[in-house]
Image (cartoon, helix red, strand yellow):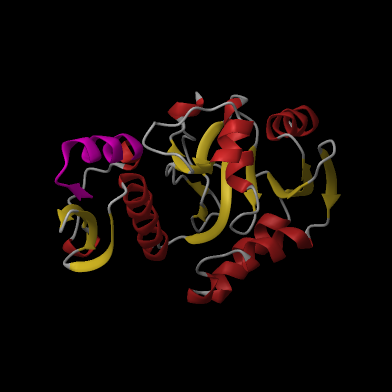
Amino acid sequence: MRAESADIFDRVDRLLGVLERPLRARPSNTFSLATKNDKLTLYRDCNYLAAHDDKEVMILRALAELNRAAVAATPHFAVHAGVVGSEDHVFVIAADSGGGKSTLTAAMLQQGLEYGSDEALCLDDEALVVPYPKPISLDSWSWNALGLTPDDTFTEEAPFTAGDLGAGLLGDRRAPTDLLIPSFTDGYPSLTSLPASAVVSSLLQLSFNHYRDGARAFHLSTSLARKMRAWRVEVGNPIETAKHILASLA
């Protein structure tokens, strides 16, 4: 990721610093933010992606495009899910976009869990989690519900790191222990046990790349179904829900 503005570079660098690896980027992985015709313009290599005069819009767009490229390129089986862990548990929060997984992921980090991802459960061939700790994007409802204050650049949606939430990063590759499928309610939080088939169906339905190697995707999903517990989570207040999950399961 490159940016001609030192201010934008510092903001993006803070958000992406945990993803840094001692590798030089290939040209096909280079994203650039530059000013053109009084607008901040995003390129991938030399290809135009978007332009806007609002810094907030373009930083979020750059993060989204970078994430999309990273998920598309991963060699691992990847599922649209959040991942958080404690010493004894690794929780997978599986939901479609807008299903509340990022909000619940952030709430659980505030309760002392470690951060794996809010976007992709990535599994190696041993069905162990490969962490992908990208910034967590939260809308204004979510950050207010969680008592968070975003950088004043952002007004409607804002990225937060695990450190912003007082959390560390998930360490060595670990096996998932519990699948949480959230749905929002106006009532009290609750947990309902689901059959093992919910693990298989959720992982395959929400996978980004099961089509690349269907046999591997099915093998990993059925392998986890024999080891994981699955739960329907009624999410009321996200902080109280996170506390309820940990009191019930951890």
Drawn side of residue 211 relative to residue 65, left or right: right
Drawn side of residue 130 relative to residue 236, left or right: left
Residue at horizontal 43%, vertical 34%?
161
Per the picture, the main secondary structure of the magenta-coloured stretch is helix
Residue at horizontal 62%, vertical 47%?
101
Nearer to me, 68 or 145: 145
Residue at horizontal 17%, vertical 37%?
6
User: Which quadrant does the C terminus fall into?
Assistant: top right
- Quadrant hosting residue 236: top right
Nearer to me, 90 or 166: 166
Measured from the top left, where is residue 122 in percent x and y? 50, 54
Q: Which stretch appears magenta?
A: 1-15
Residue at horizontal 49%, vertical 55%?
124
Is residue 175 in sight in this rendering? no
Residue 10 highlighted magenta (yes or no): yes
Drawn side of residue 194 relative to residue 7, left or right: right
Measured from the top left, where is residue 89 in percent x and y? 65, 35
- Quadrant hosting residue 69: bottom left
- Quadrant hosting residue 97: bottom right
